[in-house]
Structure formats: structure tokens, C-alpha cells
Image (cartoon, rainbow, N blue to C red):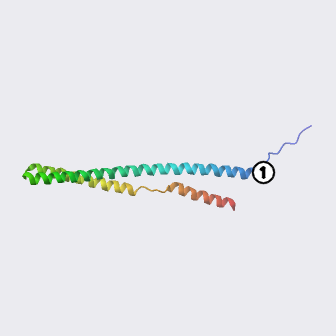
Amino acid sequence: MTYPSAKPREPSLGQLVGEIGEDLSKLMRQELQLAKAEVREEATKAGKAAGLLGGAGFAGYMVALLVTLAVMFGLGNVMDLGWAALIVAAVWAVIGAVLYVTGRARLREVSPKPERTVETLKEDARWARDLRK
């Protein structure tokens, strides 16, 4: 006696809906991980820019200190010592300006919005809308 070959069972509607739910859940977890990675990346850039701006602040402090010393020594004895202090202060001013401009430019590059995640979420929404049609 031969048995009829068994047809593979097709998944039920409930199983299909369950699989879609699992897939969407997995997709959302992956999107969340991507968003976290992007936020970490942007925070790193912001930290570096803040460090440069901190360096500019220190350079500004040094300018004020050395200019004050230069004026003091210059008025005190009108000798080369005062002019030397003024030259050092001018060098610190240039360093501070370079650090400030560089830090400000890098800070402008920082984006608080996770661009790639937003784009993939839009794609996911389009995919979900197309799936319902």
C-alpha cells in the first residue's frame, strides 16, 4: 500500500502575522542600535570640538596674563624684557585664534539628529505602507 505524498503545510494567517510582528520587532531593535551608535559618534565629535574651544579659552587667559605682564614690565623700566613678553603674548593670541576657529568649524559639523537612522526609518515606513497594499 502506498501512501499519498504529504503536501507541505502552508503557514496559517496567524503564523504569518506572528512572523511579521517578530520581523518588525527585530527591525526596531536594530534601528535603535543604529541610533545609539550614531549618537555616540556625534557625541565624540562634540567632545573634541569642546576640547579645542577649551584650549582657545586657556590661550585667551594666557594672552591676558602676558599682556598684563608686558605692560607692567614695559612701563616699569622700558627695557627689552617688556617687549619680549609682548611678543610671547602675540604668539599666544595667534594660537588662541587658530584653536577657536578650528573648534568652531568642527562644532558646526556635529549633528544632534541621527541622519542615517532617520532615513532608514523612513524607508521602513514606506516598506510597511507598500506591504499593506
Q: Is residue 98 left or right of residue 76?
A: right
**Few, some or many C-alpha atoms within 10 Å of disc 1 (few <14, some 14-19, many ≥20)?**
few
Between 61 and 49, the one nearer to me in the picture: 61
Q: Determine the image quadrant of residue 128.
A: bottom right
| Residue that lies at the very extreme toward the top in this rendered image | 1
Residue 1, horizontal then vertical, whole percent:
92, 37
How many numbered badges does the structure rendering display? Answer: 1
Between 20 and 63, the one nearer to me in the picture: 63
Q: Is residue 92 left or right of residue 16?
A: left
- Residue at horizontal 60 percent and vertical 56 percent from the top: 124
Residue 28, horizontal then vertical, whole percent:
60, 51
Which element carries disc 1, helix, strand or loop?
Answer: loop
- Residue at horizontal 69 percent and vertical 60 percent from the top: 132
| Residue that lies at the very extreme toward the right in this rendered image | 1
Question: Which residue does the numbered mark 1 point to in the structure image?
Answer: 12
- Residue at horizontal 65 percent and vertical 61 percent from the top: 129
- Amino acid residing under circle 1: Ser
